[in-house]
């Protein structure tokens, strides 16, 4: 499902116009992104939680040349599914 399909599904389920569904989805994405930038965790009970984790610096290998390269440390977004979501996917 892509963003347009998700907007259609939200619109149909919540009985909103597509414009309102798009605004709601964009607001969710913006709010979640801002919280993650601040290092905060975003938890949606039953669905899952978004958090930021730090990846350590490490050595990697260029697959074309085989040369060893240094990969810098960085922060990445992580999603962990909640119990209800995990059950429904089984």
Image (spheres, rainbow, N blue to C red):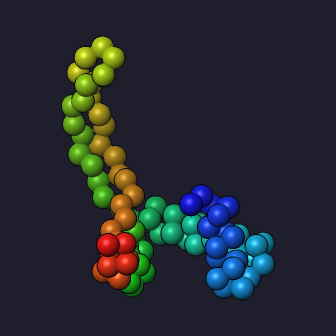
Residue 50 picture quarter: bottom left
Provide residue 4's location: percent of width, then percent of height: 67, 61
Relative vertical location of residue 72 with respect to residue 2 in this rendering, above or below:
above
Provide residue 78's location: percent of width, then percent of height: 36, 61
Provide residue 36's location: percent of width, then percent of height: 44, 65
- Residue at point 56%, 60% (across, down): 1
Query: Furthest-front residue in view?
Result: 90
Relative vertical location of residue 6 with respect to residue 73 in this rendering, above or below:
below
- Nearer to the camera, 69 or 12: 12
In this orientation, does residue 26 appear?
no
- Residue at point 46%, 61% (across, down): 37
Q: Is residue 44 left or right of residue 9?
A: left
- Residue at point 62%, 67% (across, down): 6
Residue 21 picture quarter: bottom right
In this orientation, does residue 70 appear?
yes
Provide residue 25's location: percent of width, then percent of height: 63, 71
Q: Is residue 87 left or right of residue 25?
A: left
Quadrant position of the C terminus in the picture: bottom left
- Residue at point 67%, 69% (across, down): 7
């Amino acid at each position: 499902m892509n963003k347009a399909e998700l907007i259609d599904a939200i619109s149909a389920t919540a009985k909103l116009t597509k414009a309102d569904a798009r605004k709601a989805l964009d607001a969710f994405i913006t709010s979640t992104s801002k919280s993650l930038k601040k290092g905060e965790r975003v938890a949606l009970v039953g669905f899952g939680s978004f958090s930021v984790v730090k990846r350590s610096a490490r050595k990697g290998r260029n697959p074309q040349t085989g040369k060893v390269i240094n990969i810098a440390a960085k922060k990445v977004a992580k999603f962990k599914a909640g119990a209800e979501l995990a059950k429904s996917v089984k």
